[in-house]
């Protein structure tokens, strides 16, 4: 069994790290680099940076933040938000990212998934999905921080994207994000059953047991954590120790 990855998710607005509830009501947390360095030094496995206002700029605005981080952290970095073309992906990867996460542009032009995968490798092409429950056991893909409907079924879209070349899925439950009510394990499970690539669970971690549940019941390959880390509710060390105590395979540091 591969190690379950513990990932810090950093949502960025302008120069600031922010945190919201259901991707709304955003609160400024501080300097993203300071948070990233703290998590890196504590042994986090990966960092995910998401530019949540990229649509205002017309492109991802994180190159300087990512470049600064890449000079000092030596773990995988994924960057998402506003990446609309192969050139956008190249710019972010040259800034120091290892992977790009694409949502809106992939929906508008699915062939972009193949274009990025062919140019940089499927391991660098992460499909970002914002999911909202629309009926019991069924979720719809949303864009624009969970505000715009697409009409796409999450499970079907994930399976299609993997066929096109997506090498990983960042799956965010908008309903659970920032609520501390736990990951949407059923959603993760359905997507995990439909695809052959790793699935990152994002949105909702309130307790350490929520991580255990989404891995054991949902089959998540990784967990992306924001609120629990940013507010110092749990340390990376505590998260890793709890995972080990409950039989999860995680990286030893």
Image (cartoon, rainbow, N blue to C red):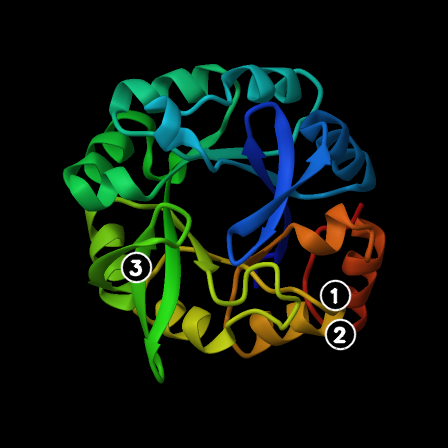
Quarter of the rendering containing residue 156: bottom left
Q: Residue 129: where, in percent of width, then height?
A: 37, 53
- Circles 1 and 2: CB atoms closer than 8 Å: yes
In the rendered structure, which disc, 2 or 3, sits on the residue that comes first in sequence?
Answer: 3
Instruction: Name the element at disc 1.
Output: helix
Q: Residue 116: where, in percent of width, then height?
A: 27, 31
Quarter of the rendering containing residue 181: bottom right
Q: Is residue 103 above or below residue 67?
A: below
Q: Residue 253: where, in percent of width, then height?
A: 80, 45
Residue located 65% across and 22% down the image: 69
Per the image, the residue denoted by label 2 is 246
Q: Residue 193: where, in percent of width, then height?
A: 36, 72
In the rendered structure, which disc, 3 or 1, sits on the residue that comes first in sequence?
Answer: 3
Residue extending farthest front:
25
In the image, 247 versus 185, the foreground residue is: 185
Distance (Cα) linking label 1 and label 2: 5 Å
Instruction: Name the element at disc 3.
Output: strand
Per the image, the residue denoted by label 3 is 141
- Nearest-to-viewer mark from 2 and 3: 3
Residue located 44% across and 57% down the image: 171
Residue located 16% across and 39% down the image: 109
Distance (Cα) linking label 2 and label 3: 32 Å
In this picture, residue 126 sits left or right of residue 220: left
Residue extending farthest bottom:
136
- Picture quarter with the N terminus: bottom right
Q: Residues within 10 Å of mark 1 (few under 14, many from 20)?
A: many
Residue 243 numbered tag: 1
Instruction: Name the element at disc 2.
Output: loop
């Amino acid at each position: 069994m591969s190690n379950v990855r513990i990932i810090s998710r950093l949502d960025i607005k302008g120069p600031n790290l922010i945190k919201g509830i259901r991707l709304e009501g955003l609160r400024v947390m501080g300097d993203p680099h300071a948070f990233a360095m703290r998590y890196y030094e504590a042994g986090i496995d990966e960092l995910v940076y998401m530019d949540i206002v990229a649509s205002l700029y017309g492109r991802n605005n994180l190159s300087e933040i990512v470049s600064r981080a890449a000079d000092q952290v030596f773990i995988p970095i994924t960057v998402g938000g506003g990446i609309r073309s192969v050139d956008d992906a190249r710019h972010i990867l040259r800034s120091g990212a290892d992977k790009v996460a694409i949502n809106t542009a992939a929906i508008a032009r699915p062939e972009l998934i193949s274009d990025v995968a062919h140019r940089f490798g499927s391991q660098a092409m992460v499909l970002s999905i914002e999911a909202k429950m629309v009926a019991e056991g069924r979720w719809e893909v949303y864009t624009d921080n969970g505000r715009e409907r697409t009409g796409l079924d999450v499970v079907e879209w994930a399976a299609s994207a993997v066929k096109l070349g997506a090498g990983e899925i960042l799956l965010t439950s908008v309903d659970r994000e920032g609520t501390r009510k736990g990951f949407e394990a059923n959603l993760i499970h359905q997507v995990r059953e439909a695809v052959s690539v790793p699935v990152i669970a994002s949105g909702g971690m309130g307790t350490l047991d929520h991580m255990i549940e989404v891995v054991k019941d949902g089959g998540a390959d990784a967990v992306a954590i924001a609120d629990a880390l940013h507010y110092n509710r749990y340390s990376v060390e505590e998260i890793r120790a709890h995972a080990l105590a409950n039989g999860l395979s995680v990286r030893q540091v």
